[in-house]
Image (cartoon, rainbow, N blue to C red):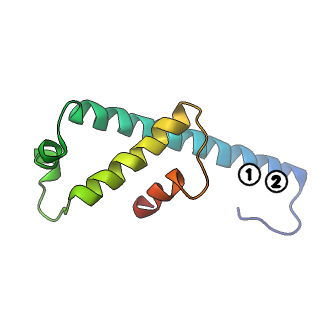
Amino acid sequence: MAYTGNMTFKEFSLQTQAKGNNLLSAIREGKILYDKFYALTYGLTDEQILALPQFLVTGDTMDQAGLNALRYALGVFHDLDAGNALAPATRDSYLVPFL
């Protein structure tokens, strides 16, 4: 349900609960992605990461810029899971290419 000009308290409450649950789920699932990526790439150089079979799939165009963007986007989930706040127009902007 989208916002309407005549929402009741119950509607506001239900929407807040739904959005909160969705946000927590996204943060937790994003943190799992971060953990998997970290485990996959720990100790590797960027060149070694880019050469991983998972990133050499036909049609994928993983390059240094894409790797950096992915690393920062996953870092957002790590930061949120750790309880760190995002600075406006900085870390959150790294999610935009993946939305």
Report if the CB atoms under discs 2 and 1 are less than 8 Å apart.
yes
Q: Is residue 34 left or right of residue 41?
A: right
Quadrant assignment for the C terminus: bottom left
Q: CA distance from mark 2 to mark 1?
A: 6 Å
The residue drawn where x is 53% and y is 33% is 81
Which percent across, then down, holds residue 92? 53, 54
The residue closer to the viewer here, 53 or 22, is: 53
The residue closer to the viewer here, 29 or 79, is: 79
In the figure, residue 80 lies in which quadrant?
top right
Q: Is residue 37 above or below residue 3?
A: above
In the figure, residue 94 lies in which quadrant?
bottom left
Q: Secondary structure at mark 1?
A: helix
Q: Is residue 55 above or below residue 36?
A: below
Which percent across, then down, holds residue 32? 39, 34
Q: Which residue is mark 1?
A: 15
The residue drawn where x is 30% and y is 34% is 38
Neighbour class for label 2 at 10 Å: few (<14), some, many (≥20)? some
Please give the label number shown on residue 11.
Answer: 2
Amino acid type for the residue under numbered disc 2: Glu
Q: Is residue 80 left or right of residue 8?
A: left
Quadrant assignment for the N terminus: bottom right
Which percent across, then down, holds residue 5? 86, 69
The residue closer to the viewer here, 38 or 29, is: 38
Neighbour class for label 1 at 10 Å: few (<14), some, many (≥20)? some
In the figure, residue 8 lies in which quadrant?
bottom right
Q: Secondary structure at mark 2?
A: helix
